[in-house]
Image: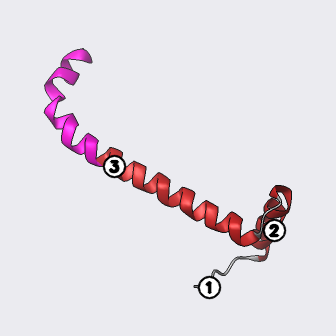
Amino acid sequence: MTLRLSEDETRQLRDRAEREGRSMQDVAKSAIRDYIDRADRRESLEEVLATELPRYADALERLGQ
């Protein structure tokens, strides 16, 4: 895989990696893992809400009044 970054993105990634004492690749891989983890959690939450909210809609409606 080839990742093409703008000059500014490359500079920011290089600066971040230097501040953390890590390689640019390690920082990028970590960011990708974090993104995937957040997306997975968000999808899981959306699945639970889609299933459970309708189930408790009446009770939630009454609580909101």
What residue is drawn where x is 17% and y is 29%?
Answer: 57
Q: Are marks 1 and 3 in contact (CB under 8 Å)?
A: no
Q: Nearer the viewer, residue 23 or 61?
A: 23
Residue 60 percent coordinates (x, y): 22, 23
Q: Earlier in the sequence, mark 1 or mark 3?
A: 1
Residue type, label 1: Thr
Residue 21 percent coordinates (x, y): 83, 60
Q: Residues within 10 Å of mark 2 (few under 14, many from 20)?
A: some
Residue 15 percent coordinates (x, y): 84, 63
What residue is drawn where x is 48% and y is 52%?
Answer: 38
Q: Which mark is residue 44?
A: 3
Q: Is residue 64 above or below residue 10?
A: above
Q: CA distance from mark 1 to mark 2?
A: 17 Å
Give the residue pinned by disc 1. Answer: 2
Residue type, label 3: Ser
Q: Earlier in the sequence, mark 1 or mark 2?
A: 1
Q: CA distance from mark 2 to mark 3?
A: 33 Å
Q: Are marks 1 and 2 in contact (CB under 8 Å)?
A: no
- The C terminus is located in which quarter? top left
Give the residue pinned by disc 2. Answer: 14
Instruction: Determine if the magenta segment contains residue 58.
Output: yes
**Magenta-colored span:** 47-65
Q: Are marks 2 and 3 in contact (CB under 8 Å)?
A: no
| Secondary structure category for the residue under label 2 | helix
